[in-house]
Amino acid sequence: MCMQKSDIILKMRTADICPDCMEKLQSNLSTPEIHHALVIMESLRLKMLFAQNFRQTSPPSRLKIDRRGRIFLLDYANIEIRMPAMEKAIYILFLKHPEGIYISQLRNFRQELTEIYIHLSTRGLCEEMREQIEKLMNKLTNILTNQLSVKISRIKKAFVDAIGESLAENYIIEGGNGERKGIKLNRGLVEMNNEDQNRISPK
């Protein structure tokens, strides 16, 4: 009867049943049925402990970006990290700059970010789209807004939702206030299949 997720996780990892719940079980189930339930819980407990240890010791996966801008983690069952085009463009920009980028200097990368975003777009580059991109870039590179922070948070969520927080640490964009923000993943594990079939230089 755990109402808090943290309590549920703890109970599953310990395969423990509190006295109140055990009393309810004994009043409604036979001894063989309770024994069977405990066997199942023990099996789940072992699997959860294994998964936790795996996440803690598993090496980072290779990251691949294909021609369509889709992001895959090759060694984690080729799982795809899904996010909107602008978030992908920001992520690729930071991948291309392993030294990191100061948020206050993002305007210096405006042209590069625009080109990446246009390459990822599937709608074609019409005049209306140019105007939309211009407005978006104005918001994104304005340090008085929090647009970039919002995008970075969404990028982090995409990785965490896909592979969990501990494994995601190698792939997210992070850095302290006033410091360069970057992705710590070794660039030797990153491959981009763009029009020129260029590979990102190892860090």
Image (cartoon, rainbow, N blue to C red):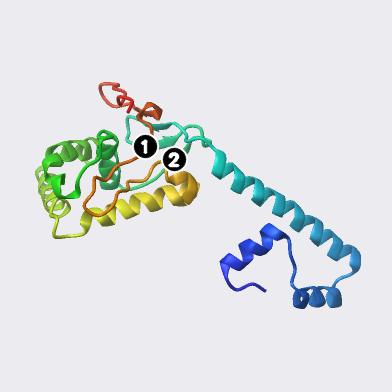
Seen from the viewer's position, the closer of residues 84 and 144 is 144
Looking at the image, the residue that sits furthest to the right is 31
Is disc 1 in contact with disc 2, using a CB cutoff of under 8 Å? yes
What kind of residue is marked 2?
Glu
Question: Secondary structure under badge 2?
Answer: strand
x, y percent for residue 191: 36, 27
Check residue 70 in the rendering and tell me which mark sits there, or answer none.
Answer: 1
Give neighbour class at mark 2: few <14, some 14-19, many 20+ (Cα, 10 Å).
some
* SS label for mark 1: loop
Q: CA distance from mark 1 to mark 2?
A: 7 Å
Residue shown at the point (19%, 49%) measured from the top left:
103
Q: What's the residue at 59%, 42% (across, down)?
A: 54
**Is residue 29 or residue 109 the one in the foreground?**
109
The residue type indicated by label 1 comes to Arg
In the picture, measured across the screen, residue 48 lies left or right of residue 145, that is: right
Residue located at (24% from left, 45% from top): 180
Task: Indicate the quadrant containing the C terminus: top left, top right, bottom left or bottom right.
Answer: top left
Which mark identifies residue 80? Answer: 2
